Image (tube, rainbow, N blue to C red):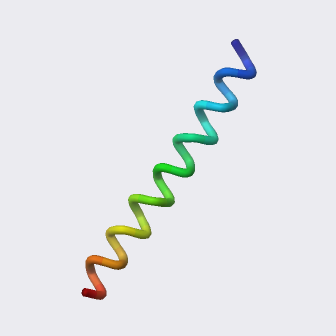
Amino acid sequence: QCHFKKQFDTHSNVLLIYLRTVSQVSRVL
């Protein structure tokens, strides 16, 4: 359970970074 939670948190962080990058790129464009 704890291991799964850790994986989920990592995945969420990656998703947040991805969304943030996309928003910045779209702002530049």
Q: Outermost residue, bottom direction?
A: 28
**Image quarter hosting the N terminus:** top right
Q: In this view, does 14 lie to the left or right of 27?
A: right
Quadrant position of the C terminus in the picture: bottom left
Image coordinates for residue 5, horizontal then vertical, percent: 64, 24
Outermost residue toward the right in this view = 3
Residue 7 in percent (x, y) is at 66, 32
Residue 10: give x, y in percent of width and height: 63, 41
- In the image, residue 16 above or below residue 21: above
User: Relative to 10, is 17 above or below?
Assistant: below
Q: Residue at x 41, y 64 (%)?
A: 20
Q: Quadrant of residue 2?
A: top right
What residue lies at 43% left-to-right and 69% top-to-bottom?
21
Identify the residue at horizontal 27%, vertical 81% (top origin): 27
Say which residue appears at 35% left-offset and 78% top-offset: 25
In the picture, measured across the screen, residue 14 lies left or right of residue 16, that is right
